[in-house]
Amino acid sequence: MAPKLAAEFIGTLWLTLGGCGSAVLAAAFPEVGIGLLGVSFAFGLTVLTMAYAIGHVSGCHLNPAVTLGLVAGGRFPMAQAVPYIVVQVLGAIAGAGILYAIASGKPGFELGGFAANGFGDHSPGKFSMNAALITEVVMTFFFIVIIMGATHGRAPAGFAPIAIGLGLTLIHLISIPVTNTSVNPARSTGPALFVGGWAVQQLWLFWVAPIIGAVIAGIASRTLWPNDTTSVEGR
């Protein structure tokens, strides 16, 4: 179990550092010019690279919603879910901590939103709480459907990380304007703890909505497209 937990910690740290880091560091400078497209690809690339790096160790969940979605889909044992979620959150906090240490080294540093997720006045596009809730449920639903399908016993072997990474990229392209894109409670928790205030107050939505979407997707996939070959633990 220890190697799996270490892999999940490192992987979630990388997702938070790479994805949020692209927003806080690179996208903050107009001359770099990565914008929404670059940040979206950064998140997708963190998952794609880690899926190949640690997928054979832990399944590369990197996300409490993914873990619970796989439990609901019959692909992962519930007994291991809590330890996975704990180390995912700790990894995200560590990733946000490293990012803070780097970002705060710039003269005149201001924390700002620090890639935290939000709605209302804290949504990039000022979208309402209801819009944010719907977005996070639906986007996470499709993320889990992609994961369940790409890792199905009848899916082409070896290509799952590509489909999942590109799926997460597309999800960010759609939803960054609405919530700054969570679909991952751990990723949301790390930056929120550094921002404090409004980010912590709104954090509940970025736990509740992704988990609802993930569980629905897991149940739907298990029911509609059962994996009748060897089951997998994740990505």
Image: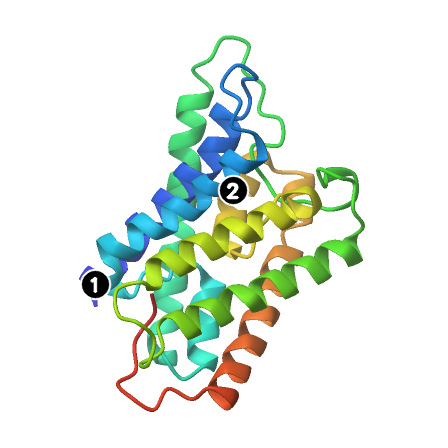
Crowding at mark 2 (Cα within 10 Å: few <14, some 14-19, many 20+): many
The numbered dot on residue 214 is none
Residue identified by numbered label 1: 57
Crowding at mark 1 (Cα within 10 Å: few <14, some 14-19, many 20+): some
In the image, 30 versus 219, the foreground residue is 30
Q: CA distance from mark 2 to mark 1?
A: 26 Å
Q: Residue furthest front?
A: 156
Residue 230 screen position, x and y as percent: 26, 85
Query: From the viewer's perspective, is 105 left or right of 109?
Result: left
Question: Residue 200 falls in which quadrant of the image?
Answer: top right
Q: Residue at x 51, y 56 (%)?
A: 184
Query: From the viewer's perspective, is 218 left or right of 231?
Result: right
Residue 20 screen position, x and y as percent: 48, 37
Q: What amino acid is found at the position of numbered circle 2 in the picture?
A: Ser
Residue identified by numbered label 2: 40
Q: Residue at x 26, y 70 (%)?
A: 157
Q: Quadrant of the N terminus?
A: bottom left
Residue 195 in view here: yes
